[in-house]
Image (tube, rainbow, N blue to C red):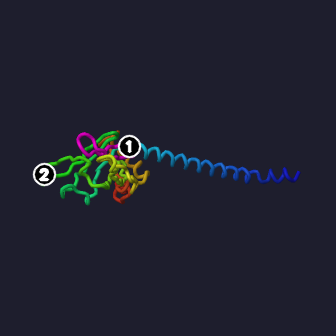
Amino acid sequence: MEFIKFIANNAMTFLTAITVILLFYYTKETYFLRKESQKQTQFQFTPYLSLRNLENGATFSNLGKGVALNIKVDESVQFNGQPFLIIPSIGSKENRLLYYMLKDKCALSLDSIDLPNKINITYSDIMGNKYEASFLREYEGMGVFKEVSQKLISQIMLEARSFNIIKVIKIMLLGNKLKDQPTRASLETPTSLINN
């Protein structure tokens, strides 16, 4: 009988404890779902570059799903004393030739046999993440390069990116109407409070 009285007197405590345990479990599962969602979103925007020798010359190919932007060959790597040109973008499953600039302002592509044994590049994706890749010549295949490393070197926070995406969508939907709306700072000034 005392056991039943004890349970009746402490029912709220037991229910609160059970609620806290369930809330903790739900929070943990939601956190894991969010992390997995971030990985999938990042995968959709991640470029993956390779260096190949195609018919027209040394070519960077994007094997990833995202667009690679501002592909830069390390400045210490040059051909005939001339640096390589920056490739503005390479879309998913696209190829871009590697060019260098002659002194008479003429851009030329070159065969990968003419490249040095190791090439380091940096590039970014459309979300602002920066990547670094290294390619090393395989001597048994003439002009064939293998990837030594390809890694993320800096990452923009997802929250900042999602805020910018929301802002872009609002501008697209509302157009110039957003420009006419007062900002939060102007609403908090004393003059705007007096005028209202």
Residue 148: image x %, image y %? 38, 53
Q: Secondary structure at mark 1?
A: loop
Q: Which of 196/188 is in front?
A: 188
- How crowded pointer 2 is (Cα within 10 Å; few <14, some 14-19, many 20+) is rated as few
Residue 68 vs residue 182, the one in the foreground: 68
Mark 1 is on which residue type?
A: Gly
* Mark number, residue 105: 2
Q: Residues within 10 Å of mark 1 (few under 14, many from 20)?
A: some
Residue visible at 79% across and 53% down in the picture: 9
**Residue at disc 2, secondary structure:** loop
Q: Chief secondary structure of the magenta span?
A: strand
Residue 55 rendering spot, x and y as whole percentages: 25, 39
Q: Position of residue 4 (x, y in %)?
A: 84, 50
User: Residue 12, how many percent across, how many down?
Assistant: 73, 51
* Residue shown at 36% from the left, 60% from the top: 190
Q: Which residue is mark 1?
A: 64
- Magenta stretch: give its range: 46-62
